[in-house]
Image (tube, rainbow, N blue to C red):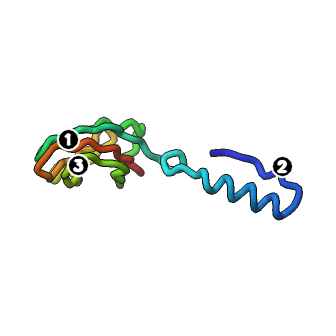
Amino acid sequence: MKFTTELATNVYELIEYLALGLRSVDLHENTISFIKEDLKIGAGSTVKIANPLNRLTPKKYLVVSQEGVGQITKAKGKKWTNDNVYLINNGSEEITATIIFMR
């Protein structure tokens, strides 16, 4: 989110303006990241996800929503690369999740 502070005529307006902007901060917009929505992973299954970050390999991931009983982790023995990342569902049933991958 981009905004200008030139519209504030005094310090109180500036604080009000900045507070409004800070309440609108979005994690995905302010990090080098990509979102994978509605990702289905079967029980005990590993999924390969294409990495669109152009020559950058994600280092972290954040599960922002999940339906189903499961535990999502990095797939052991599968190295994350500039091309793909790998996750596994260690749970006993299929899950559907939205995940943010970050640099």
Q: Residues within 10 Å of mark 2 (few under 14, many from 20)?
A: few
Q: Residues within 10 Å of mark 1 (few under 14, many from 20)?
A: many
**Occupied quadrant, residue 81:** top left
Amino acid type, mark 2: Leu
Earlier-in-chain disc, 3 versus 1 = 1
Earlier-in-chain disc, 2 versus 3 = 2
Mark 2, secondary structure of its residue: loop
Tell me the residue that label 3 is attached to.
79
Q: Are marks 1 and 2 in contact (CB under 8 Å)?
A: no
- For the N terminus, the image quarter is top right
Tell me the residue that label 2 is attached to.
7
Q: x and y percent of residue 32 in the render? A: 47, 47
Horizontal side, residue 26 vs residue 68: left or right? right
Horizontal side, residue 8 vs residue 94: left or right? right
Residue 16 vertical placement versus 28 (above, below): below
Count of numbered circles on the image = 3
Q: Residues within 10 Å of mark 3 (few under 14, many from 20)?
A: few
Report, in whole angstroms, how far the alpha carbon at label 2 lies from the one at label 3: 49 Å
Which residue is nearer to you in this view: 11 or 55? 11
Tell me the residue that label 1 is attached to.
41
Report, in whole angstroms, how far the alpha carbon at label 3 lies from the one at label 1: 18 Å
**Occupied quadrant, residue 56:** top left
**Occupied quadrant, residue 95:** top left
Which residue is nearer to you in this view: 13 or 60? 13
Q: x and y percent of residue 37 in the render? A: 35, 38
Amino acid type, mark 1: Ile
Q: x and y percent of residue 66 in the render? A: 29, 48
- Farthest residue to the front: give it: 68
Mark 1, secondary structure of its residue: strand
Mark 3 or mark 1, whichever is nearer to me = 1
Report, in whole angstroms, how far the alpha carbon at label 1 lies from the one at label 2: 48 Å
Residue at 31%, 35% in the rendered image? 50
